[in-house]
Amino acid sequence: MFGSYKNEDVTILLKDITGQVKPQSTEEREKLIQGGRHYCEMLPIEYEPSDQYMKSFYTALDMYSGITAEAVGRLGQLIYKDKGENAVLVSLARAGTSIGVLLKHYMDRKYGTNVAHYTISIIRGRGIDKNAMDYILARHKPQYIQFIDGWTGKGAITRQLEEAMKDYPQVSAGLGVLSDPAFISEKCGTHDDFLIAGSCLNSTVSGLLSRTFLRSDIIGEKDFHGAVFYKELANKDLTYKFINTVEEHFSFEDYDLTDNAADTAENTMEEVKSICRDFGISDINLVKPSIGEATRVLLRRMPWKMLVHSLDDKEHLGHLYQLAEEKGCELVEYPLKHYRACGLIKTMADN
């Protein structure tokens, strides 16, 4: 076990590759990614948030813990209704892991269960960790597995899951998320594009773990996908600050679990394609819709522009305004329909 999650909260099915991979700068990685190198073969230098940005995180935590807790409750009840007391939560590292811990705590308290929770790697373009899947299926029946993530953007991971589960026909590819503005997840806490405070930070709200890593010189055929444990950031670890603060707002009332919104939802991918046309973008992977994805663009990638539904929505987008200013990224007001924000990544070909 490595990372700062408690053993009883999650079984981490990742290989510890601490000290084996040299982190690279954002610009260096962006050039390599756009040149054809896969992002999973590199690791970024972790962003060190400024004092001002940390204030934004705490503000977001204070403002959105209530709606986050409600989304956890609604999603937890949907999962229990479908999977019952034998539910097996399989969170997608790393953004999904803290969400999985929250769901486990909620379900255990509401239903008196001891829900199994694992976290595994899935990588866009490379698929799911089959060794981790085999580990879980050796211990649990396939019909009880529920995949978990934080939010949806364009639905790339949803499509990746659907492709991966062709090898596991008895396992549902349905994904459960807290925020589903793309209207594509099987289960969600809400369709509102709201700020999950955990998306504001990287490893320091994710058990001090890096994003997952897959490269054949380090990850063998029988290994789990890898991750780095940032032990040196222990004094900045806010993983359980986030989890505990959200849990203070848990309500164990029975929620209305009907979801009619998806029946009338417009196709969110059409909105992404419109953004591509309006800004002359040929690679759809450079467009990252949703607050969660936009935050990641500013934290991990080379941002070009940050589209926001309003330049005067500090309540929902204050942390993005702050990060954009720090990164010198232009904020552009744009008539977004399904999302409150959308990050556009800089094309590196001419740099």
Image (cartoon, helix red, strand yellow):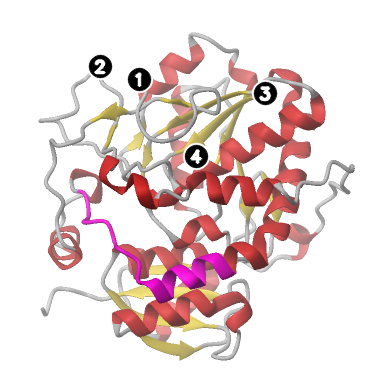
From this viewpoint, is residue 149 visible? Answer: no
Separation of marks 2 and 4 at Cα, in angstroms: 23 Å
Label 4: state its secondary structure.
helix
Please tell me whether residue 44 belongs to the stretch shown in magenta. yes
Q: Are marks 1 and 3 in contact (CB under 8 Å)?
A: no
The stretch of residues the image draws in magenta is: 43-59
Q: Residue under label 4, please give it.
A: 97
The residue shown at (36%, 28%) is 129
Q: Residue under label 1, please give it.
A: 131
What numbered label is drawn on residue 222? 2
Q: Which amino acid does label 4 sit on?
A: Thr
User: Closer to us: mark 2 or mark 4?
Assistant: 4
Q: How crowded is mark 1: few (under 14 residues within 10 Å), some or many (20 or more)?
A: some
Residue 138 horizontal/vertical position (percent): 48, 9
Q: What residue type is labelled 2?
A: Lys
Q: What residue type is labelled 1?
A: Asn
Q: Is residue 295 above or below residue 160?
A: below
Closer to the chain start, of discs 3 and 2, is 3
Closer to the chain start, of discs 4 and 3, is 3
Separation of marks 1 and 3 at Cα, in angstroms: 20 Å
Separation of marks 4 and 1 at Cα, in angstroms: 18 Å
Rendered-image quadrant of the C terminus: bottom left
